[in-house]
């Protein structure tokens, strides 16, 4: 039986299909609604650092006695996760190092397990049953279809002892649903923690001028206003990173979500000139060639990120920044992209001075180019704050913490655990 979400209703959005809109006014920072996950999975890379059940981050986690690869806060969390962990526990032991399902594959296995359990619709499906999430399976290109087929094969390989599978067509549709509607759970610095499905949130449409932001408390998703909203306003989030110019954003939307955005920002392209800023007296032909070089370099960096050493990756960043810097201003988004990557590599290599040097080049243009209350901005402030503290630059660290906190109090809410920790940190300084 369908239930309602107070202050929010489902409606048919012009040119977008289904959508959500508010039925009362909401102020900036106000919570529209929260949703538990229908199901979720902790990233394999984060095993040992977070509880598999509640995603709590702590040092002394208890390990599963059988597989030795799942970690929990306590017995209560371990018991709470057993219905999902048992899908993988014995398989991880049996396959050993050969156990390698993708994160999407693991999430689909958990969805199939949830569907098998006969009970009423869960509290994450108040206005949209999981079966009704859009799949776009008919729009999937050959490359993505092959990826999905490979995931179907892995599903059968690693989960056949614990699950009964629908036919291949239904499985491919389910993988497409997860691809289009899955949410990445991130921490306060935007590090990937896991993936989850929230059917009700899947109704929220995209805009490059979002009215709300989704943040996470454990595995629960919170939807908060980043603009003042009046009754009838549509609830809109951004599906993608908004740093990039219009053509890049829409290419990403077409590739991943099968539509082109027609929001006011995409129609006006008002920020494109600033985002693609070139040095004075630069010919259009040279600028166009450098844009193509930048896009190619970004693709190559992504492909090689897990294959090259940190030193090699940093060298790629430095070489590309030198090449692009002959044409682009430092505030050009392609320069910013590689600068951000360089900062991350330096942090990984414990090169604190290098990380600060790159981070300080990011913060002003990020603040200008991203929407208000962007976590992309607060996460850089947080990183800089911690780096400054390592270098004993306490006043600069305090300033960065305050700026991160101001954003996160709106995006996460004043009572969120991350925000409380930041206040505690500032009290101790």
Image: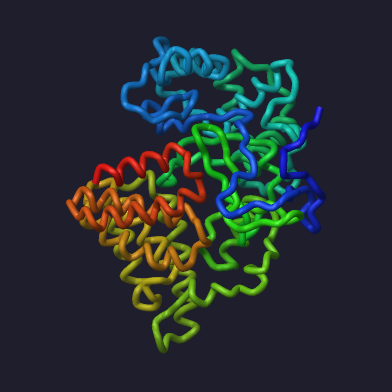
Residue 4 picture location, percent across and down: 76, 36
- Relative to 419, is 337 above or below? below
Quarter-of-image position of residue 50 = top left
Residue 67 visible in the picture: no
Residue at (74, 54) in percent of width and height: 231
Quarter-of-image position of residue 402 = bottom left
Residue 109 picture location, percent across and down: 61, 25
Residue 25 visible in the picture: yes
Q: Judge by depth and name the residue closer to the eye, 125 or 325.
A: 125
Residue 144 picture location, percent across and down: 62, 45
Q: Residue furthest bottom?
A: 281
Quarter-of-image position of residue 135 = top right
Residue at (58, 54) in percent of width and height: 28
Q: Residue furthest top?
A: 66
Q: Quadrant of the N terminus?
A: top right
> Does residue 258 appear to the left or right of 245 in the view shown?
right
Residue at (56, 17) in percent of width and height: 87
Q: Judge by depth and name the residue closer to the eye, 338 or 31.
A: 31
Residue at (46, 33) in percent of width and height: 43
> Does residue 349 appear to the left or right of 363 in the view shown?
left
- Relative to 176, is 367 above or below? below
Question: Which colour assignment does the render follow?
Answer: rainbow
Residue 395 picture location, percent across and down: 23, 56
Q: Judge by depth and name the residue closer to the eye, 103 or 293.
A: 103
Q: How many marks?
A: 0
Q: Judge by depth and name the residue closer to the eye, 216 or 346.
A: 216
């Amino acid at each position: 039986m369908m239930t309602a979400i107070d202050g929010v209703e489902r409606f048919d959005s012009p040119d977008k299909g289904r959508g959500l809109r508010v039925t009362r006014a909401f102020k900036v920072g106000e919570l529209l609604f929260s949703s538990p996950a229908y199901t979720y999975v902790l990233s394999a890379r984060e095993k040992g650092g977070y509880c598999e059940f509640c995603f709590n981050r702590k040092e002394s986690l208890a390990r599963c006695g059988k597989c030795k690869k799942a970690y929990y806060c306590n017995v209560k969390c371990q018991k709470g996760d057993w219905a999902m962990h048992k899908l993988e526990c014995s398989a991880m032991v049996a396959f050993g190092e050969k156990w390698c399902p993708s994160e999407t594959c693991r999430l689909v296995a958990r969805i199939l397990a949830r569907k098998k359990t006969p009970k009423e619709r869960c509290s994450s499906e108040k206005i949209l049953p999981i079966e009704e999430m859009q799949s776009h399976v008919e729009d999937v290109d050959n490359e993505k279809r092959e990826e999905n087929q490979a995931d179907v094969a892995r599903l059968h390989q690693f989960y056949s002892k614990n699950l009964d599978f629908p036919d291949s067509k239904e499985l491919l549709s389910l993988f497409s649903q997860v691809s289009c509607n899955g949410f990445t759970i991130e921490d306060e610095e935007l590090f990937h923690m896991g993936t989850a499905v929230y059917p009700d949130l899947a109704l929220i449409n995209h805009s490059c001028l979002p009215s709300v932001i989704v943040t996470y408390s454990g595995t629960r998703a919170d939807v908060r206003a980043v603009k003042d909203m009046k009754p009838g306003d549509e609830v809109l989030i951004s599906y993608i990173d908004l740093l990039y110019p219009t053509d890049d954003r829409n290419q990403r939307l077409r590739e991943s979500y099968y539509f082109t955005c027609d929001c006011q920002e995409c129609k006006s392209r008002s920020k494109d000139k600033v985002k693609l800023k070139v040095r004075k007296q630069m010919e259009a032909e040279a600028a166009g060639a450098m844009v193509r070089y930048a896009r190619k370099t970004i693709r190559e960096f992504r492909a090689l990120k897990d294959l090259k050493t940190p030193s090699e990756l940093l060298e790629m960043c430095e070489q590309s920044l030198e090449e692009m810097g002959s044409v682009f201003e430092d505030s050009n988004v392609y320069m910013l992209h590689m600068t951000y990557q360089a900062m991350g590599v330096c942090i990984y290599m414990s090169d604190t001075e290098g990380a600060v040097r790159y981070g300080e080049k990011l913060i002003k243009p990020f603040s200008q180019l991203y929407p208000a209350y962007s976590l992309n901005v607060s996460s850089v402030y947080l990183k800089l704050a911690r780096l400054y503290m390592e270098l004993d630059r306490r006043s600069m660290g305090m300033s960065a913490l305050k700026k991160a906190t101001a954003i996160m109090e709106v995006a996460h809410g004043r009572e969120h655990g991350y925000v409380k920790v930041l206040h505690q940190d500032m009290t101790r300084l």
